[in-house]
């Protein structure tokens, strides 16, 4: 039986990946942070909480990283743990850097020293590219536009360095935005679908947003965790872009989500609030996943419209069941 350690198992991707690996017969270890409130709702959604070996780890604490990796000696390690919200990274740049950059470095160093058979997946991001007009691939210029993006470039380059200098199997998945019914509530897609459900069921009247001209390449998290696993089944480590190849604006998302929900024209419900604008933003991100398709056989299975339908349906169901 293969073993996998997922850092950040409580997150959106962590829970989808844990479910995926358990179905493949893996022994799954998953890291969580101590908090004063419950945090396993995504694992409960998949009904897998009791199937995961939970381990306590914080990326800002190298001692915990060391202990967990030494004790578990996993065949595969997925570093999904991060301060993942770009917006807050402008307010908490040092925390973001400590977690996403220095934390990743501690993971690579620990694997090198005490578990060097372990294959590592590093969660790199399209946010590393910043603004430019081209469709992004593995060779595109990195010009990050947020402390989050900068921290991810550090981790990405460090993974490449450990690969080249020490022969570590450290693969970076450069994933474009991926969403699901389990997406965090502050990200724009889930914020929209959650608020549509609240408006539809009479709990709210308005939805406040920022830069709705921004465009992103939105895919489905369930498809993207499969690509992560496929990357670690290769003989050599590398970098892969994972994307749908289509970009849509936040306005496009609003158009279809409001229409599908039956609420009608989003302009009757949406107001722009300056506080949701960022000091710097990326206008448009679209990725070219040709390498992932050729080498991994990976393709997205869920369309933009289907993704929105899943998220709207799920949020209406949750609010109906009084899960806020
Ligand atoms: P997410 O839902 O925010 O999950 C992040 C996970 O990291 C959570 O389990 C969180 O724990 C954990 N975490 C946060 N700070 C930590 C710390 N100091 N020590 C240990 N764990 C910590 O993010 P996601 O959407 O699943 O994304 C997974 C990874 O992919 C992240 O690295 C993200 O930056 C990257 N990524 C995401 C996307 C996307 O569109 N989703 C695209 C490209 C790259 P708590 O539950 O305790 O907060
Ligand atoms: N969150 C949010 N809230 N974003 C808004 C809002 C709002 O009210 N209004 C407009 N936006 C715009 C943001 O300015 C941004 O241009 C776009 O919607 C998407 O924002 P997010 O959903 O927060 O995602 P992100 O693209 O910044 O970051 C996500 O994708 C990255 C990959 O490109 C995160 O998942 C990152 O962790 C990930 O690396």
Image: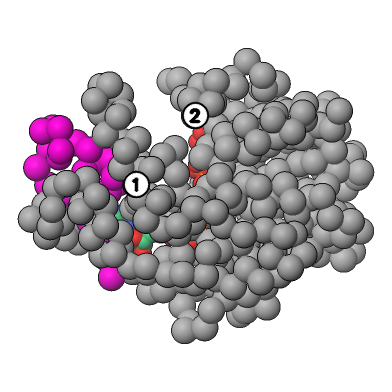
Quick one: SS at disc 1? helix
Between residue 216 and residue 230, name the one nearer to us: 230
The residue lying at 59 percent from left, 73 percent from top is: 288
Between residue 147 and residue 209, name the one nearer to us: 209
The residue lying at 16 percent from left, 60 percent from top is: 272
- Image x and y of residue 157, in percent: 71, 66
Query: Height in image: 318 above or below 254?
Result: above
Query: Height in image: 52 above or below 256?
Result: above
The magenta stretch is: 190-213
Position of 183 compared to 114: left or right? left
Residue placed under numbered mark 2 in the picture: 42
Position of 71 compared to 51: left or right? right
Tell me if residue 168 can be seen. Answer: yes
Q: Which mark is residue 321?
A: none
Q: Quadrant of the C terminus?
A: top left
Colour convention of the picture: one colour
- Image x and y of residue 311, in percent: 36, 43
Quick one: SS at disc 2? helix
> Residue lying farthest bottom?
133
Position of 242 compared to 246: left or right? right
Image quadrant assignment for residue 30: top right
Question: In terms of sequence position, does the residue under pointer 1 or pointer 2 come before the other?
Answer: 2
Tell me if residue 103 can be seen. Answer: no
Residue placed under numbered mark 1 in the picture: 309
Q: Quadrant of the N terminus?
A: top right
The residue lying at 62 percent from left, 46 percent from top is: 225
């Amino acid at each position: 039986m293969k073993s996998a350690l997922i850092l950040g198992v409580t997150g959106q991707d962590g829970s989808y990946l844990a479910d995926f690996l358990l179905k493949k017969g893996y022994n799954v270890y998953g890291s969580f942070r101590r908090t004063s409130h419950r945090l396993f709702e995504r694992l409960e959604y998949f009904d897998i909480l009791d199937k995961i070996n939970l381990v306590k780890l914080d990326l800002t604490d190298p001692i915990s990283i060391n202990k967990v990796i030494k004790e578990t000696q996993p065949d595969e390690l997925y570093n999904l743990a991060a301060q993942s919200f770009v917006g807050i990274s402008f307010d908490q740049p040092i925390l973001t850097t400590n977690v996403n950059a220095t934390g990743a470095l501690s993971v690579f160093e620990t694997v090198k020293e005490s578990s060097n058979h372990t294959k590592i997946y590093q969660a790199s991001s399209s946010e590393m590219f910043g603004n430019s007009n081209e469709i992004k691939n593995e060779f595109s210029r990195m010009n990050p536009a947020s402390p989050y993006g900068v921290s991810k470039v550090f981790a990405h380059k460090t993974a490449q360095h450990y690969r080249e200098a020490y022969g570590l199997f450290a693969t970076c998945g450069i994933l474009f935005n991926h969403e699901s019914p389990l997406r965090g509530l502050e990200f724009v897609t889930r914020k929209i679908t959650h608020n549509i459900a609240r408006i539809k069921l009479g709990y709210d009247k308005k939805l406040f947003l920022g830069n709705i001209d921004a465009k992103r390449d939105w895919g489905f998290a369930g498809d993207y965790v499969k690509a992560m696993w496929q990357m670690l089944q290769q003989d050599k480590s590398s970098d892969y872009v994972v994307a749908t190849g289509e970009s849509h604006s936040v306005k496009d998302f609003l158009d279809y989500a409001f229409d599908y929900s039956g609420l009608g024209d989003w302009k009757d419900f949406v107001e722009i609030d300056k506080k949701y604008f960022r000091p710097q933003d990326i206008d448009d991100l679209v990725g070219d996943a040709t390498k992932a398709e050729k080498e991994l056989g990976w393709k997205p299975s869920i369309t933009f419209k289907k993704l929105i339908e899943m998220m709207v349906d799920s949020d209406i169901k949750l609010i109906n069941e009084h899960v806020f």
